[in-house]
Amino acid sequence: MLRKIRITIAVIVMTLITLLLLDFSGTLHPYLGWLANIQLVPAILAVNVVVIVGLAVLTLVFGRIYCSVICPLGMLQDLVSWLHERFGGKKAKRRFNYSPAKWWLRYLMLGAMTAAMIVGIHAVIALLAPYSAYGRIATNLLQPLYIMGNNALAAIAEHYESYAFYHVDVWVKMGATFAVAVATLLVVGWLAWRHGRTYCNTICPVGTVLGVLARFSWFKVYIDLDKCRTCGACSHRCKASCIDSKNHAIDYTRCVTCGNCLPSCEFGALHYGHPRAAAQPAAAEQPAAASTEQPSRRAFLVGSAIVAADAALAQAGKKVDGGLAAIEQKVAHTHRATVTPPGSLSVKHMAKYCTSCQLCVAQCPNQVLRPSNDLATLMMPTMSFERGFCRPECTRCSQVCPTDAIRPITMEEKTDIHVGFPVWLEQNCLPGTRHVACGNCARHCPTGAIEMVPLDENDELSPMVPNINEARCIGCGACEYVCPSRPFSAIYVEGYEVHN
Amino acid sequence: MDRRNFLKKLGLGTATIAAPAIVSCTSDKSSGAPHEPATGKMTMRINPNTGDVVSLLGYGMMRLPVVGGNGSAREEHSEIDQEEVNRLVDYAIEHGVNYFDTSPAYCQGQSEHATGIALARHDRSKLFIATKLSNFSPDTRSRAASIEMFHNSLRELQTTYIDYMLLHAIGGGKDAMQEFEERYIDNGILDFLIEQRNKGVVRNLGFSYHGDIAIYDLALKMHDEGKVKWDFVQIELNYLDWEWANEINDRNTDAKYLYAELAKRRIPAVIMEPLLGGRLANLPDPLAHRVKKRDPQRSIASWAFRYAGTWPGVLTVLSGMTLMEHLKDNLLSYCPLEPLNEEEMRALERLGGDIVSYNTIPCNDCKYCMPCPYGINIPAIFVQHNKCLAEDHVPHDRMDPTYAAARRAYLVGMNRAVERERQADHCIGCGHCEPHCPQRIKIPQELQRISEYTDKLMREE
């Protein structure tokens, strides 16, 4: 029963969260956005106390059920493991064995994550946060297929003159992030195929934190010693390798409350519920697990979240007719500072809070956001304006961000957030080099920051070139996008490290 | 065989005989099969100068079909579907079409070659070939280059003579007078063509006209003064341009005037743009209903063809037919022509006035403006904008209950029709296109208007 409920919820949540990450139209986010907000790492980064307390209570009542029905990376591993069981023959179902917990590795990873959160080392957070790892896999590997499916529907819709679906470009946004997504899928997938929940129980810091809480959960799986024949069937069935059937002990720090073991016992010795005093299992190997330490450990967790929050608050030639001229693809300029989206306050703030889940990148309707390739900001969203510009009516990235790395902003606020400033390159500018009238940057500037003036101020008839008032520029990139100079625009946006 | 079996066999036999009889009875009335044009019924017009008996429908070779596409062969890297061209030409000739109009510029320069191949399979003496001296580019305006262009036309068309030779689109350019003199007078090319007419290499000499009325008047003055005799003149005529061309764009002249000037001199008129590049086939819904109500059996396009054909001074009406459906529908209008009566003519001219009120951009998708050096797909943008106007997908009032649907249709439709990087917001206003437009559309201005409108729609999410 527990197993069936768990699988049903997992299938539903997994489907919805994947849809949230795949959707590019912005229609699903209002209904499904909460699924990203209830993920633990984003909630801690966003100091979402309701979610943090809620998840702690959930774990203290039901055990590590979070890892089975909320965390998409956990559910992905269950899926891989199930596929092995389904197609791997009889042996696959009984391929697990009890193994002692690797505490040193678990605490090392948790320590690294906590330190990274406090100091703001973005790459560590991004790599270790399980939701973000799944986000990268879904947006990099699945979204292109999803969009291709959409495009097939769009083609059909076009045939019938319907506007229900529209075409969306499929493109690899950044190689490095794509590679990380593939590597994550291979490593996690391989571990899941072989050993079930190894990743969750040795590497994942969220698993470690929840494991510590789960030890004291009210409901748990327990062994009825009167009925147990010590056959070991449950151990072989446990993907978390946490049932020590010989000693009748269960490591609750690793049990993800999946319920797979319950039906595996032929003698009805396994139960899920609040263990009766008589059937209380013998203490498993629990290093440093005296119940007196409970409050201090919990205090540590909450404490670390608050520390992180405080730190965050402190920073803020025509001969014939027809034909189309070939268009050279635009190439991004090398930036001194990455341009981060409005609402992200500063590069530092972004680095501290962003877990690189790619939700904002997947949602950006203007093809502006993409994961960064720079080492310091690797996989974090960065703005680039070769395929579009940050349109004034859109605040979608700020609405979807589950970690508050991009704070929610309104359209009105956006008009006053300066994320960068324009740089004009005279050697690329067409009026000067090709002697054609242009002024497209000035025409499209939403803030009127660009004025066209004669190149030679003493000669009214000299070519008109842009004259930029940096103070009025908000860094939306419209000028860079519509600039006819290719492959390098004659005007581009350089990022501010701190927005103003 | 017993009696029962015999009767059974007899019944079956009767039925099989009866069946086709029933089918043939109903096919005329209710089978729904479209009418097929009849052969041997084409309305013919006689050229008073040469006595040529010319079909009222002329085949314009500007919008030829392209391999693997449903558009015409004027996009990037598009190759003409020669097999399809042959099939269309064969069908047209079979149904009486004998006038074929091409140019060295059409279909990115591939049209004459394709026309030559298609026509070489037929009896040359029964066909009339029209081509043009399309020396638009300054480097083809020298005497030598222009003469080479003429000889090349003969080669491509696989013929030793041209029936109808035109100076291509006089009246265009930034300075129309200067351009006219540069292209045809100063280099002596007009004299060269007159000489060719004397030799019989050119049978009829004329010009096609768009744009500056001063050039039209000048050309006719030359005719009056005996400097050059025009055997025919090609003008744009349809029920919209008849009285409204000047209203739509004050740089243009009503067809009424152009036609009257020719009629006065008994110069046969060859008609181009009878359908305005399809714009008169794709009317705004309320207007389309009005036309359809007059005769539900006739296509909307057929009214435009019958309008042009009804004018007695018209020698032939050119149509750039890309698809077999276009060809068949046009043949139905002219095999034979049922001339419009006075009331119908006036009703169509009034309809023209109502079309003007929709503010469509007068682009006929001729693609003379292309290629834009900055990659903008000008005609595709205009055609799409016009399509939205006709379908009532250009919303202005946000309170309108259909606003959201119309907005989506406009934005999604534009992205479908034109790649984002070729849309109006990328027009820098260099003005390279403008002198090439036969309709004299202020292209950069219109593109900026569309860009601003699109931007506004996007903001009003």
Image (cartoon, rainbow, N blue to C red):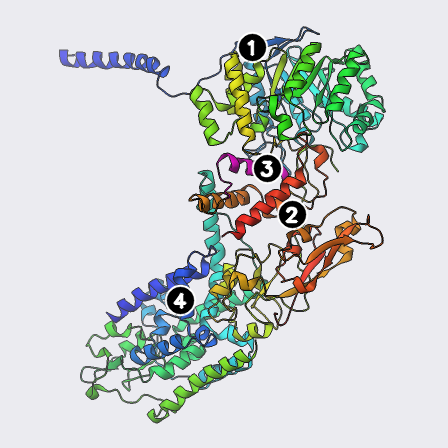
Residue at mark 2 to residue at mark 1: CA–CA distance: 48 Å
* Pointer 2 local density, CA inside 10 Å: few below 14, some 14–19, many at least 20: many
Discs 2 and 1 lie in a common subunit: yes
Verify CB contact (< 8 Å) between mark 2 and mark 1.
Answer: no
Can residue A88 be seen from the camera position used here? no
Label 3 belongs to which residue? B382
SS for dot 3 = helix
Q: Which comes before the other along the chain, label 2 or label 1?
A: 1
Residue at mark 2 to residue at mark 3: CA–CA distance: 14 Å
Q: Amino acid at mark 2?
A: His
* Pointer 1 local density, CA inside 10 Å: few below 14, some 14–19, many at least 20: many
Question: In this orientation, which residue lies closer to the viewer: A459 or A474?
Answer: A459
- Location of residue A390 in the rendering, given as x and y in whole percent from the top left corner: 58, 58
Q: Residue at x 37, y 81 (%)?
A: A211
Among the 4 quarters of the image, the one containing residue A500: bottom right
Closer to the observer: label 1 or label 3?
A: 3
Q: Is residue A383 above or below residue B151?
A: below
- Give residue A35's mark: 4
Q: Amino acid at mark 3?
A: Phe
Closer to the observer: label 3 or label 4?
A: 3
Label 1 belongs to which residue? B43
What's the chain of the residue with tag 4? Answer: A
Discs 4 and 1 lie in a common subunit: no
Residue at mark 1 to residue at mark 3: CA–CA distance: 35 Å
Q: Amino acid at mark 4?
A: Leu
SS for dot 1 = loop
Q: Is residue B196 above or below residue B85?
A: above
Label 2 belongs to which residue? B426
Discs 4 and 2 lie in a common subunit: no
Q: Amino acid at mark 1?
A: Thr
